[in-house]
Amino acid sequence: MRRKPETDRVVLVTGAATGIGAAIAEAAITRGHRVLLTDIDADAVQETARRLGTRAAAFRLDVRDAASWAKAFDTAEATFGPVDVLVNNAGIIHTGHARDLSLQQHRDIVEVNLLGTMTGIHTALPRMTAQGRGHLITICSMTSFLALPGYATYGGTKHAIRAFHHAVALEERHGPLHFTILHPPSTRTKMLEQELADPTSVTAFSEKSTSPEHVARIVVDAITTKPVEIVFPPLAGRVQRIAGALPQIIRWLIPTVEAAGKRKRQQLIDSGKTHLFTVPGGPK
Ligand SMILES: NC(=O)c1ccc[n+]([C@@H]2O[C@H](COP(=O)([O-])OP(=O)(O)OC[C@H]3O[C@@H](n4cnc5c(N)ncnc54)[C@H](O)[C@@H]3O)[C@@H](O)[C@H]2O)c1
């Protein structure tokens, strides 16, 4: 069988109307791949795909809906061919401390971030195994290592996604599939804007944020290099990963982290930078 070139993969991205997902779709197309952009927001994902040209197509996918997942894979196959790469990117946050969120808000986060990602992987496994190839890329978060105030359920879902992803990868290690999980730092998207609006999310501002385009370049490199796990920035990411395993260290560090986050968040607000999100393809 003729091998497909590494630069012409069929990629399905969730949450691709905006933010990291849209940037991944754009970077993948620039490298020669073809992308089915999916999102719960049908109009926005249509508009993003239209902007990216003929190697892009759009489909409305609510990641919580198993039947829509099957239709998304069928649509990708009918449009471009069988899906080679699934990028599970869609995610949400409701900001605030656990006691102040409604139970429904806690459930929303679990349903999208955790069950949505699990449903995607569950849909992809038999299809990709049958076709003899496939790469499952999970966009997770540094909160999969760190339990932080303001991120109780969000971080809980990210811890769980990481465990699920790696456990499935081990179960499938004798098969044809590849698994990569990636943990971006704070990234300038609408999600980070939402966090900027709420002082309970200050820890997100204690570190330097990055752009969705930077995260996207690393994701698209991973389509070729297939690393098991990526934390970044590489050094600070490793330190955070170790600290996360030791809650005593976090208890000791958290006042310093919160003070730095508070100061930097205030600097952003004072400089009028409440709009952090840059439209992909627009001025950076
Ligand atoms: N922005 C950050 O600082 C940051 C840091 C680490 C990890 N992440 C993760 O990266 C991923 C993308 O985040 P982002 O910052 O681009 O977010 P964003 O809010 O900018 O975009 C998320 C996209 O997901 C879509 N979406 C929401 N619910 C959906 C559903 N049920 N089904 C399908 N699509 C849905 C939204 O319509 C939106 O287009 C998320 O998993 C997030 O947890 C973000």
Image: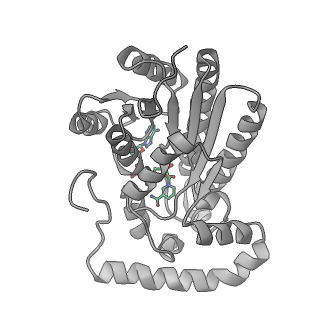
Pick out the residue farthest to the front.
Answer: 2
Give above or below for 95 relative to 269.
Answer: above
Q: How many dots with numbers?
A: 0
- The answer to whether 152 appears left or right of 33 in the picture is right
**Residue at 51%, 40% in the rendered image:** 223
Residue 120 quadrant: top right
**Residue at 47%, 43% in the rendered image:** 90
Viewer-closest of 211 and 67: 211
Viewer-closest of 105 and 113: 113
- The answer to whether 68 appears left or right of 41 in the picture is right
- Residue 72 visible in image: yes
Residue 28 quadrant: top left
Q: Position of residue 94 (x, y in %)?
A: 49, 56
Q: Position of residue 113 (x, y in %)?
A: 56, 44
Q: Position of residue 107 (x, y in %)?
A: 59, 45
- Residue 152 visible in image: no
Q: Quadrant of the N terminus?
A: top right
Give above or below for 250 relative to 210.
Answer: below
**Residue at 52%, 22% in the rendered image:** 3
Q: Quadrant of the C terminus?
A: bottom left
Q: Where is residue 181 in the image (x, y as percent from the top left)?
A: 61, 47
> By what rule are the colours in the image chosen?
one colour
